[in-house]
Image (cartoon, helix red, strand yellow):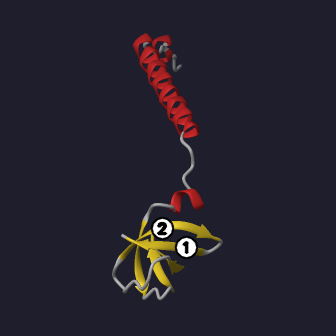
Amino acid sequence: MFQIDPNWFQVDPWLIVIVAIGISAFLAITIIWGIRAHRHQASAGREDLIGKTAIVKVALEPEGIVFFKGERWTAVSEKGRVEPGEEVIITKVDGLKLYVAKK
């Protein structure tokens, strides 16, 4: 008849220690990253746009189109005409319209 050897079912104590250390390290890193993510302020909306640089696509005289972070925006130049290809700085946001000044 077939006999089961009790040594087959023993777990090496070092294996238990290594697995416990690995799980503890994973949990510690996950908790630290989670805390860091919650401490950072989200950057979105009007506050994120002001002061950034956009590129003029359609001449601003005073209204036209600018390109910012892959999006086309309607923009108004605060000081005179701005030619396509020039860079402008966003100074104000009003709804979906940006107010810009030459860089």
Is residue 46 toward the left or the right of residue 85 in the image? right
Q: State how far apart marks 2 and 1 are (Cα).
A: 7 Å
Amino acid bearing label 1: Leu
The answer to whether residue 9 is above or below residue 99 is above
**For numbered disc 1, what is the local secondary structure?**
strand
Tell me the crowding category of disc 2: few under 14, some 14 to 19, or many 20 or more residues within 10 angstroms, Cα based.
many
Can you identify the residue that label 2 sits on?
90
Q: Identify the residue shown where x is 40% and y is 83%.
A: 82
Q: Is residue 101 visible?
A: yes
Q: Quadrant of the C terminus?
A: bottom left
Can you identify the residue that label 1 sits on?
98
Q: Nearer the viewer, residue 2 or 91?
A: 91
Tell me the crowding category of disc 1: few under 14, some 14 to 19, or many 20 or more residues within 10 angstroms, Cα based.
many
Query: Mark 2 near mark 1, Cβ–Cβ under 8 Å?
Result: yes
Residue 53 in the image, given as x and y percentages of width and height: 41, 67
Residue 94 in the image, given as x and y percentages of width and height: 63, 70
Residue 18 in the image, given as x and y percentages of width and height: 41, 19
Q: Identify the residue shown where x is 50% and y is 85%.
A: 62
The answer to whether residue 23 is above or below residue 7 is below
Q: Residue furthest front?
A: 79
Q: Nearer the viewer, residue 38 or 65?
A: 65
The answer to whether residue 58 is above or below residue 91 is below
Q: Identify the residue shown where x is 41% and y is 81%.
A: 56
